[in-house]
Structures are given as C-alpha cells and as structure tokens.
Image: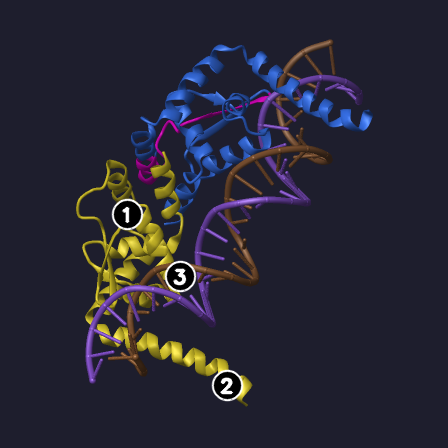
Chain colours: A yellow, B blue, C brown, D purple
Amino acid sequence: MEEVIAIAKALSDENRVRALMVLGEKEVCVCQLIELLQLAPSTVSKHMSILKQAKLVDGRKRGRWMYYRLPEKPVSMTVERALAWVRASASGNHRILLDAEQMSAILEMDREQVCERQSLQRKQIVFKRRLPSGI
Amino acid sequence: MEEVIAIAKALSDENRVRALMVLGEKEVCVCQLIELLQLAPSTVSKHMSILKQAKLVDGRKRGRWMYYRLPEKPVSMTVERALAWVRASASGNHRILLDAEQMSAILEMDREQVCERQSLQRKQIVFKRRLPSGI
DNA sequence: ACTATATTTCGCCATATAACGAAATGGAGG
DNA sequence: CCTCCATTTCGTTATATGGCGAAATATAGT
C-alpha cells in the first residue's frame, strides 16, 4: 500500500503529471523540462526525484546532463497500471497537447541553445537583482 | 487533468485508501468507518467528503446515518480506472485484509451498538477531561 | 589545478493538509 | 416544541509540500 500512496502522491502535482506525460516515448533531460515547465532548476530536480522515487521514471546521467524517461520494464503492476491510467486520463487535455508541441520544438533546438538560454536568464536575474542596489 | 489531480490527491492518504477498499461491494456508514479507522468523527467526515468530491464514492443519508458506497455507474473512465487501479494494487495488502475482517465484524454488530460505543467513548473523554480539574 | 556548466541538496517561506475538539446542523422521536 | 443523536463545519495545531535562491556537487574542457 505504501507503493499506492507514493504513486498517488507523485501524481498529485500538475507539473509532475505534465513532466510524465511529456516523456511519452522520449528521453528528456532536466534542462529541457526546465524550459517547458518554466520552473527553477531546483524545483524540476525535486519533482523528477519524486517521480523517480515512485518508480514512475528512470533516470540516467550522461556527462553533465541528466535524462529521464519512462521505465522500460515495468517495475510492478501497480506502476504499470498507474502509468496507463495517467496516460489514458490526461492525454486529451489541452495543456498536455500544448506541452507536447512545445517539447517537440524544444527537442528541435540544439542542446547548447537551451542551456545557453537558461544561463542567460540566470544572468539576467542576477543583473536585475543587482541593478537597484547599483543605482 | 484537474480530475486526475483530484483523484490522485484523494488517494494520497492511507486512511482514505483504507476506507475506499473496505467499501468493496458494501455500503458502510460513517460511524462504522469511525469504528474501523479509529479517527475522530470530524476527520472521517472530511476524508469521505474528499473521496466524494473526487467522485470516488457516492453518499446518501438515511435518517441520522450517512452511508457511503462505491459509485454504481462509472462517473468517468478516469474514475473507473482509478478505482480499478486501487483495487488491484492494494487488495493483497495485509492492512487491507485485516480491515476487511474487522469491517465484517463491525457490520455484524447492531448499528445501535456501534453508535453507543462511540457515544460512551466520547463521554469518557469528557469525563476524563473534567476529572483533573474536579479533583 | 582551474574554470565553466548542469544538476542536486539545503534552507527558507508560503500554502496545503491531516488530526482534533467544539460548535453548528440535520434528522428522529416524544 | 424539546431532547437526543449522527454528522458536518469551523477553527486550531502540527506537519507536509511546492517554489525559490544559494551553496554544494558532479562533469567536462583547458
């Protein structure tokens, strides 16, 4: 039953459901999810950690990049059925459809571009942050 | 997607999953759930309200007693699949098996007995509460 | 070793949630 | 109407959770 609760909790957040749905048949890295969900890196990292803990996703590290995908082999029937439930129940949702398009576009971008944009955004934030006190 | 989130949240609490599982093919009233879960009436009431909001249970009032059961007609495929998921995933759990036995015993008891026991427990609490200040 | 970069961990904050007791509400019976 | 009883609502408290920024960690390149 702990498994049921853990999975249910993992699925109780919209951003996590969005992340899960966008994985579909793809392998996506954290920076791409950050781009899509428009959340802080730390937040996306934590969300994915929760999904991974619940065995709803697999993660693997390649160099600096962390990739997540749906599990290849079903860890358990509970997980398998939960994934089937989410997919069947959320797939027609407008937000999810939009996400799929956006993720396709993000995946078309060069990896370095995505990371560069995020890096620039961080620098802008730092810059904005220092501007008021600088003037 | 709001439906998915609401259902997932409803299923994120062990007591609510236990309540759901114990309904099975039965109709159970709040006082019997109170007996089983050993929670305050207000807490059980709120839990069942959450399950009802998520369309996972139906409620009907008979006199003073409030009964809950699983929905007869599936409200939606999402609900139906979620219920199937929980049932399939939690049915072998030790706690759930124990609950089933206990609920059978509770259902064997006369309705008045259950309510009376709970009434006595409340009075004992009140009595204990006044004792220290009375002495 | 140093620098740069992606990600994770940690700490903080605001909000949500489970539990309880008390009060309010609804229903039954006299 | 009144009394009794089951349940719900409300307010409080302790804990959990989502979001963020900063610091720490892991990886790559020079």
Q: Is residue B4 above or below residue B98?
A: below
Which quadrant of the structure image shows residue B91? Answer: top left
In percent of width and height, residue A131 lies at 50, 85
Classed neighbour count for the residue bearing mark 1: other residues with Cα under 10 Å, few (<14), some (14–19), many (≥20)? many
- Mark 3 sits on what residue? A43
Three-letter residue code for mark 3: Thr
In front: D8, or A77?
A77
Which residue is pictured at 28% across the width and 37% down the height?
A: A78
Magenta highlight on residue A61: no
Question: Does residue B88 show up?
Answer: yes
Q: Which residues are magenta?
A: B64-82
Q: Is residue B118 left or right of residue B68?
A: right
Q: Is residue B2 left or right of residue A90?
A: right
- Mark 1 sits on what residue? A56
Which residue is most to the bottom? A135
Q: Are marks 1 and 3 on the same chain?
A: yes
Q: How far apart are the two marked residues, 1 and 3, measured between alpha carbons?
A: 18 Å
Q: Is residue B120 left or right of residue B38?
A: right
Q: How far apart are the two marked residues, 1 and 2, measured between alpha carbons?
A: 43 Å
| Of pointers 2 and 3, the one earlier in the residue sequence | 3
Three-letter residue code for mark 2: Leu
- Mark 2 sits on what residue? A131
